[in-house]
Image: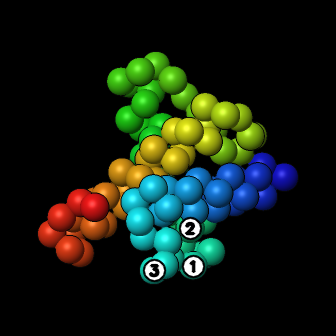
């Protein structure tokens, strides 16, 4: 059951991050889920040591969703930097 919640939360986090980073037109639902799940890993890797906050997408929590969105936005900023040479 945890992986289903992780996919749903990852999809929502990826979609919201793509809206924030203005990349929604170039991404589909599959890439939103991938970006959200990978963004959650990045967000947890950064937020744990820096702020002492851990979140999980296996069980829904608001801090976990916020961390996943922030990590997904960081991931999309890196992709924008590599593809276009600038962060939007």
Disc 2 on helix, strand or loop? Answer: helix
* Residue 66 showing in the rendered view: yes
- SS for callout 3: helix
Instruction: Give the percent coordinates (x, y) of residue 7.
Output: 69, 60
Query: Do labels 2 and 1 touch, CB within 8 Å?
Result: yes
Q: How many marks?
A: 3
The numbered mark at residue 14 is: none
- x and y percentages locating residue 19 in the rendered image: 50, 61
Instruction: Please give the residue where the numbered disc 2 appears in the rendered image.
Output: 32
Residue lying furthest left: 85
- Indicate which disc residue 28 carries: 1
Q: Residue at x 68, y 52 (%)?
A: 9
Tell me, for residue 26, which label it has, or none: 3
Where residue 67 appears, as percent x and y from the top left, is 52, 39
Residue at 78% from the left image edge and 58% from the top image edge: 4
At mark 1, the secondary structure is: loop
Residue 36 in sight in this render: no
Q: Is residue 51 left or right of residue 58?
A: left
Give the CA separation, mark 2 to mark 1: 6 Å
**Up-down relation of residue 55 to residue 33 (above or below):** above
Q: Earlier in the sequence, mark 2 or mark 3?
A: 3
Crowd around label 2: few <14 · some 14–19 · many ≥20 (10 Å): many
Q: CA distance from mark 3 to mark 1?
A: 7 Å
Q: Please report contact status of discs 2 and 3: CB closer than 8 Å, yes or no.
A: no
Residue 84, located in which quarter of the rendered image? bottom left
Residue nearer the viewer, 25 or 82: 25
Instruction: Quarter of the image for the C terminus: give it.
Output: bottom left
Which quadrant would residue 29 be assigned to in this image? Answer: bottom right
Task: Decide: few, some or many residues near mark 1? Use Cα within 10 Å; few <14, some 14-19, many ≥20.
Answer: few
CA distance for labels 2 and 3: 10 Å
């Amino acid at each position: 059951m945890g992986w289903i919640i992780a996919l749903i939360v990852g999809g929502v986090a990826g979609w919201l991050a793509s809206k924030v980073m203005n990349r929604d037109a170039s991404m589909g639902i599959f890439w939103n889920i991938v970006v959200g799940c990978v963004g959650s890993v990045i967000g947890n890797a950064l937020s744990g040591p820096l702020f002492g906050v851990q979140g999980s997408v296996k069980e829904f929590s608001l801090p976990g969703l916020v961390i996943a969105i922030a990590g997904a936005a960081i991931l999309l900023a890196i992709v924008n930097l590599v593809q276009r040479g600038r962060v939007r």
